[in-house]
Image (spheres, grey):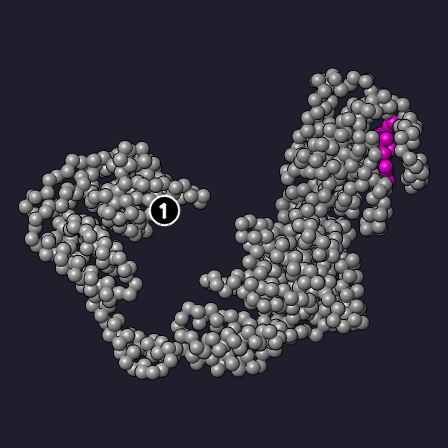
Amino acid sequence: MSVGSGDGDPGGSRREAPEKRLPVLPLRDVVVFPGTPVPLVIGRSRSVAAVDAAEKLAEREILLVTQRRGDVAHPNPEDLHEVGTVAHVAQVVRLPDGNTKVLVEGLRRGRILRVLPHPDYFRAAVREEGPTPRGDADVDALVRSVKGAVERYVKLDRTAPPDMLMGVNAIDDPARLADLLVGVVKLTLEERQTLLETFDVKARLERVYKALTNEIEYLQVERKLRTRVRRDKADTEREAWLDEQVKAIQKEVGGGGDGRDDLDELARQLAEAQLTDEARVRAERELRRLSQMNPMSAEATVVRNYLDWLLALPWTVAAPVHTDLRAAADTLDAAHYGLDDVKERILEYLAVSSLAEGNQGPILCLVGPPGVGKTSFARSIAEATGRPFARIALGGVRDEAEVRGHRRTYIGALPGRIVQAMKRAGAINPVLLLDEVDKMSSDIRGDPASALLEVLDPEQNGAFNDHYLDMDYDLSQVMFLCTANSLRDVPLPLLDRLEIVQLSGYTELEKLAIAERYLVPKQRGLAGLSAAQVEIDPSAVRELVQRYTRESGVRNLEREIGRICRKVARKVVDADVTGSVRVDAEGLETLLGPPPHDFGRREEVDQVGHVNGLSVSTTGGELLAIEVAAVPGSGKLITTGRLGEVLKESATAVFTYVRSRAAALGLEADFHDTQDFHIHYPGIPSGVEGPSAGIAMATALVSSLTGIPVRADTAMTGEITLRGRVLPVGGIKEKVLAAHRGGITRVLVPERNRKDLRDIPASVLDDVEVLLVDHMDRVLAEALAQPPLGGVADLVGATEATTDGADDVLGRDAGR
């Protein structure tokens, strides 16, 4: 960096100060003067390093230099001015957002002589400004003139603090006086830097005096303007005087108009609007306030926006609801395949509405894996009932104000999402879809799930209070629908207000029917093809379901069908084909490439220590491989495969049960002292949790110890106790569907899950034999390829000796 001469001290009356070596802090869009304390927030790594270095110095000094251009994020020495301010680092505070807040106090001007190399921050040799010479008559005269100008300025500026003049008069140092007044006058950044580089106190005072004179002239013009308005005002009221002042100001700047032409339009809209009594009283009061305000004021804009919202909301307007059950059923069936439980609940509501007028709408929560049609089904419900539809996406919402709105005291305040959706719907009885209620979270700004409690409570939502409206709004006629992938993340108080409707994954036959009726025609139309140009064979759809997608819904299936149609469309445009294109299973690999999935197929042969378990995730049921190996060791139990804590505890219970049954299983009493046992869940990228794999782990462990293979055509699910009882688990339908997809023909489920079998489609039960079990010994008897030492009779007999009534259950299962 070159060193310029700047405004030197004529006559050489100022002694040169010795140079210092100081860290340099580059500043953007700010100039710090000596004698001025300034808080700074820094975040650049080199700036933070410079402050840290200054803290380590004995005098904690640092050079503050303004950048030539504020938009340079990473300045070089050439990007900095040569003159800055040597400052004392008074305080350093590390902020939570990673930035650093520094309180500095300017001491003296400093000129960079040369930049010193340093890898972490700027460092420079600096020469400070010397002491101010005394006894200069011109400087003394300028000081008196500046103080006189300050006195005139304080008298004209109403915002000036009363003790400002006393503070200025108490300053004897001309240099300090000039630097102090920089904060009073209005100067640009370049003008401030020029003043900082002016080492000559006389020249500095002259520039400050000129800026003060300009400010005084501006204030005098303002006083003349106020005097003119006051003279014209006469005896009118204060509000009229303010109006005239605004007009006078507009006349001075060349403007005009009063900005109130829309008040009559607002009054007309208010007279025609169908509002509640409370809303009408509030609207009329706000309109009167608006008529008395300056239309250019910020508060007038706030009131105008508030009136627009009051007039746009449907307060009493209701859409006609269809009560024709047959037409509604036809509409739902035409749009969605299956989902009989949800359709039945909607038809029940329509039937009750036709008999009991004013009945509150249900609050349904559709729970199921992605892609089963929860959101689209909500649209179909609105179409079937004749209600307007509005969707509110709650995924990622973490602020309570998103639901209740912001109070009007905040800049840019708006109503919450509920009221905004009502405005879009245009009726007081729409279908409102609260999408992804399980994806909300909470932080210091509040809990949106708690705010939904009032919205979804039929006893309270007739008087929902939005913070922006600040009055009650009736939501009792709204038909609320919620969607979620899992109920685990929905708070219990919110869950208590919802009527849960489970949407399980589709079977293979249902997916084939959905593809034939809906997906293929839709994607064919989107690709611009006709039925005569492309035909997708059912065998191709079945191949897509089994090997190209792995889901409970049909979203990826629709995506793959769309890929096929687009590739066929390109062939048609390129004239590569003529006539109709038929896509079958054999041609899929040519169009889509190798299949990415084996669809969770079971093993073909019985294996020792390998069991087909079953699990449920947000994507539906899955076939789960569980492996156990017994190796020489000291009795350690090892679990791998990204297992959750509950599952690890279940593995410990399994190990204890097997030890307690060692004699009945034909095992040595000390088998656990000479071997280690490794339980592994291969191919589970997202981890697995829960106790439902208890009987599967016990079966695999017994198989590994006895050397007896486990039947490959059998899968199982159930929690195990230390006494070997099999407890009920959830997701039976999804698990049986997953077993059916994987080619399993026998599934063991807990006896106490008998009630869940009615939800399984009959087509699946025709292919899969479901065996109900209530004890682990019965599980081993059904799952192992052959009885362990002692035979099945010994195991079953032991079960009868320890389980009340087990023989009846086993007898019923055995006769299946």
Which residue: 18% across, 41% down?
Answer: 128
Front position in the image: 504 or 581: 504
The residue positioned farthest toward the left in the image shown? 11
Mark 1, secondary structure of its residue? strand
Quadrant location of the N terminus in the rendered image: top left
Position of residue 611 relative to residue 77, above or below, is: above
User: Residue drawn at (66%, 33%), measured in percent from left and top?
Assistant: 641
Of 655 and 597, nearer the camera is 655
What is the x, y in percent for residue 717?
78, 38
Image-quadrant location for residue 642: top right
Q: Characterize the local packing of mark 1: few (<14), some (14-19) or many (20 or more) Cα atoms within 10 angstroms.
A: some
On whether residue 772 falls in the magenta region, the answer is yes
596 shown above or below 526:
above
**Is residue 205 visible in the rendered structure shown here?**
yes
Q: Quadrant of the C terminus?
A: top right
- What kind of residue is marked 1? Val
Q: In the figure, residue 393 lies in which quadrant?
A: bottom right
- The range drawn in magenta is 771-787
The quadrant holding residue 298 is bottom left
Left or right of 181? Residue 472 is right
**How far across and down, in percent of the image, does residue 204 sit?**
15, 53
Which is more toward the observer, 624 or 424? 424
Residue under the point 87% across and 27% down: 787
- Magenta stretch containing residue 270, yes or no? no
According to the picture, the residue beneath numbered tag 1 turns out to be 41
Viewer can see residue 560 = no
